[in-house]
Amino acid sequence: SLRVLDGCVVVFDAQKGVEAQSETVWRQADKYLVPRLVFVNKMDVVGANFENALEEIRNRLEGHPAPVTIPMGSGSIKDSDDPFNGIIDLISMKALVFDPSNQGKTIKTLDIPEKYKATATKYRETLIDTLSAIDKKDRIATLYLEGAEIPEVLIREVLREGTIARVIQPVFCGSGREHIGIQPLLDAVAWYLPSPLDR
């Protein structure tokens, strides 16, 4: 089926990371030049490790993951001092909390909690560095060096260009079971993956 896809979303288990079948699918996507997004699922299970999943994508799959959302906490309320309770959008630099009562349809946009600010800032800087390196028109680097605000629309544009050119894979995270992070992933499919016309 990868031969006929315009783009795909590769889902990884936050606890298990890159598994054998994921590796096979990734290599097939490389072979057929399929642009892809990454979704790190099951952030609410014991032993969920977002950073480890990214590391395995880099090392085992030779991918270029570019996190666009990062988790707030990991694991469940029962087994973690800092349970997974939402995500941080690195483009808007806002925390997103999903309402479980209506399957995550209602999303609250909040300021990033103090305890996650340093981590979010670090990931945001890495994202901007990555996009600066792949922006052929040097728009992001110029704004960054001038200390100017980088517009969200420009970040999305460069993310899309990089995804379609297959030089990066935007990374999202969440929990399918708890309906956390699914809406931003669906938006990302529309924003970053190619339409049939692009292909």
Image (cartoon, rainbow, N blue to C red):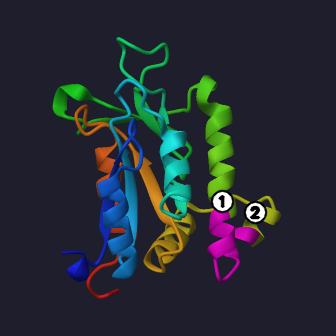
Where in the figure is residue 13, as x and y percent of width and height?
35, 42
**Residue 18 vs residue 79, the one in the foreground:** 18
| Amino acid bearing label 2 | Tyr
Q: Are marks 2 and 1 in contact (CB under 8 Å)?
A: yes
What residue sits right under mark 2 in the picture?
144
Q: How many marks?
A: 2
What residue sits right under mark 1 in the picture?
128
**Magenta: main secondary structure:** helix
Can residue 33 be seen by looking at this rendering?
no
Tell me what residue is drawn at x 68 percent, y 43 percent. 122
- Crowd band around label 1 with a 10 angstrom C-alpha radius: few (<14), some (14–19), many (20+): some
| Amino acid bearing label 1 | Ile
Q: Quadrant of residue 14?
A: top left
Tell me what residue is drawn at x 43 percent, y 20 percent. 83
Bounds of the magenta span? 130-141
Tell me what residue is drawn at x 38 percent, y 39 percent. 16
> Is 83 drawn above or below residue 90 in the view shown?
above
Can residue 53 be seen by looking at this rendering?
yes
Q: Is residue 135 magenta?
A: yes
If the image is split into quadrants, where does the C terminus sit? Answer: bottom left
> Is 191 drawn above or below residue 175 in the view shown?
below
Q: Quadrant of residue 145?
A: bottom right
- Crowd band around label 2 with a 10 angstrom C-alpha radius: few (<14), some (14–19), many (20+): some
Earlier along the polypeptide chain: callout 2 or callout 1? 1
- Mark 2 or 1: in front is 1
